[in-house]
């Protein structure tokens, strides 16, 4: 409703993962660099953690765009799957035929595929998002997948992505063996006050807006205070603030307005 009021071509604070609105501050660049490094160096396991709504899935989407054609990527969002079901999804993403095969046949086929890919200079990646919901037995099965290796190389690079509970899960004593295999862990931190401002400015600019600064400093302080620099919360709050500004025929968002919509 406020698009024409402010002269935006698009909604600045949509929560859809539109790459155009990707704000690549330092933490995001570092997270992406870690993941790319872990995959390129064939580290086996890489873990990305961060609070709810901080941008983990956003980083993964950027990673998918960054990996070149030598990579074959399977991308799962965790649900309560058995290893066999997981393998079916992995086969689908790698373009392999899974129908009618038993779990051990699937594992064997996967090994053949991964070995051939490695020999051609390729690299296989398995990304599991929402991994904080995995049960320990599922993590254990995933660990078994990482056993597929040659004397030199891990044949599949597994990226586990999840909320901080994922680390607790991995730290649980029965998963010690698993923990030893994790060579890289990156924790995505929330934006600081200045980054929150840059994030908001960036998203507003991406709508084609060229007018005066909409969010006043006091409003930005308040937004940062309330959202603690979590992008999903920033989006929701800024969206509400712009609606309210439009209704009250106010071109600027000040501290008072933010307090009204919190
Ligand atoms: N770097 C970023 N640039 C632009 N927008 C971002 C960025 N990070 C997060 N967002 C915004 O915040 C929303 C939430 O991000 P995302 O879904 O990646 O979080 P998440 O950490 O995966 O959350 P969850 O723990 O719920 O899975 C995104 O839809 C996007 O609108
Ligand atoms: Mg996510």
Image (tube, rainbow, N blue to C red):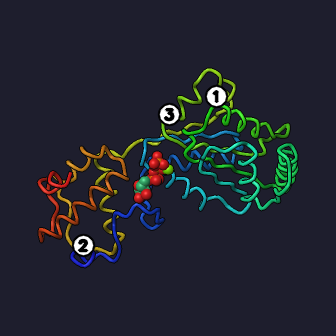
Reading the image, the residue beneath label 3 is 165
Q: Which x, y percent locates residue 94?
A: 75, 58
Task: Give the alpha-carbon distance from disc 1 to disc 3, as whole Å.
Answer: 14 Å
Reading the image, the residue beneath label 1 is 179
At a point 33% along the width and 57% down the height, the residue shown is: 235
Upstream in sequence: badge 1 or badge 3: 3
Q: Left of 102 or right of it: where is 220? A: left
Secondary structure type for disc 2: loop
Work out which residue is located at the far top of the displayed protein and give it.
173
Q: Which mark is residue 146?
A: none
Q: Left of 10 or right of it: where is 158? A: right
Q: Which mark is residue 2?
A: 2
Please state which of residues 11 and 28 is positioned toward the viewer in this rendering.
Answer: 11
Secondary structure type for disc 3: helix
At a point 45% along the width and 68% down the height, the residue shown is: 20
Residue 202: name its quadrant. Answer: bottom left
């Amino acid at each position: 409703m406020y698009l024409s009021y402010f002269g935006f071509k698009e909604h600045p604070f949509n929560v859809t993962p539109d790459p155009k609105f990707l704000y690549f501050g330092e933490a995001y660049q570092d997270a992406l660099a870690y993941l790319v490094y872990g995959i390129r160096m064939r580290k086996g396991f890489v873990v990305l953690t961060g609070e709810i709504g901080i941008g983990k899935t956003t980083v993964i989407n950027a990673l998918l765009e960054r990996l070149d054609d030598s990579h074959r990527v399977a991308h799962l969002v965790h649900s309560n799957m058995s290893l066999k079901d997981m393998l079916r999804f992995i086969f689908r993403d790698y373009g392999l035929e899974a129908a009618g095969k038993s779990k051990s046949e699937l594992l064997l086929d996967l090994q053949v595929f991964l070995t051939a890919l490695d020999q051609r200079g390729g690299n296989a990646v398995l990304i599991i998002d929402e991994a904080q919901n995995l049960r320990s037995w599922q993590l254990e099965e995933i660990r078994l997948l990482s056993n597929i290796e040659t004397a030199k190389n891990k044949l599949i690079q597994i990226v586990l992505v999840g909320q901080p509970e994922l680390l607790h899960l991995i730290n649980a004593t029965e998963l010690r063996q698993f923990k030893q295999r994790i060579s890289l862990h990156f924790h995505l931190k929330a934006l600081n006050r200045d980054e929150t401002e840059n994030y908001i400015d960036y998203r507003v600019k991406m709508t084609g807006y060229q007018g005066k600064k909409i969010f006043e400093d006091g409003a930005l302080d308040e937004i940062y205070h309330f959202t603690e620099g979590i992008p999903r919360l920033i989006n929701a709050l800024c969206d509400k603030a712009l609606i309210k500004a439009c209704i009250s025929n106010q071109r600027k968002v000040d501290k008072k307005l933010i307090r009204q919509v919190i």
